Image: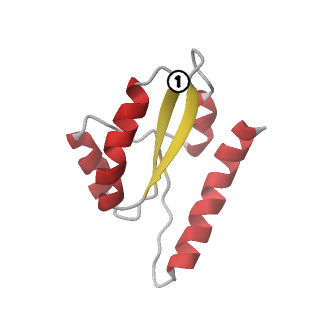
Amino acid sequence: MHPDSFADHEERNGRQRIALVIGTRPEAVKLAPMALALSRSSWADPVLITTGQHGDVVPETHSCFGLWPDMGLTVRRGNGSVAELTAGLLSRLDSPLYANVL
């Protein structure tokens, strides 16, 4: 899903969108039960966003729980620091998230 398509996740049937940003396999495992619980609730619509930090491992992990990412970011860390990775991810998230906050 293209990052701009986060706008497609506007509040549906009174359900509030909740963005869950997942970068690593441990995060995927820890957040999967939360994503499932939110999706079963009457008030929440979870939106799974992967950072690409662990490549295809995160989507493969989510598939074990019957989950699939709604949006994928591809920011490569390369030889940079974690701060550079975070800055790159935040800049990629800014447009789709900010467009839906106002």
Looking at the rendered image, the quarter that the C terminus falls into is top right
Residue at screen point 41% across, 60% down: 23
The count of marks equals: 1
Left or right placement of residue 24 versus residue 81 in this view: left
Which residue is nearer to you in this view: 74 or 93? 93
From the top left corner, tell me how far across and down residue 49 is, in percent.
47, 47
Question: Who's the residue at 66% across and 45% down the image?
Answer: 97
Q: Percent from the top left, x then y, of residue 43?
A: 53, 24
The picture places residue 30, in percent across and down from the top left corner, at 32, 52
> Compared to 80, does 54 lie above or below?
above
Name which residue type carries label 1. Answer: Trp
- Residue at (31, 48) in percent of width and height: 59
Quick one: SS at disc 1?
loop
Vertical position of residue 58 compared to residue 35: above or below: below
The residue singled out by tag 1 in the image is 43
Q: Residue furthest left?
A: 64
| Residue 99 percent across, percent down from the top left | 73, 41
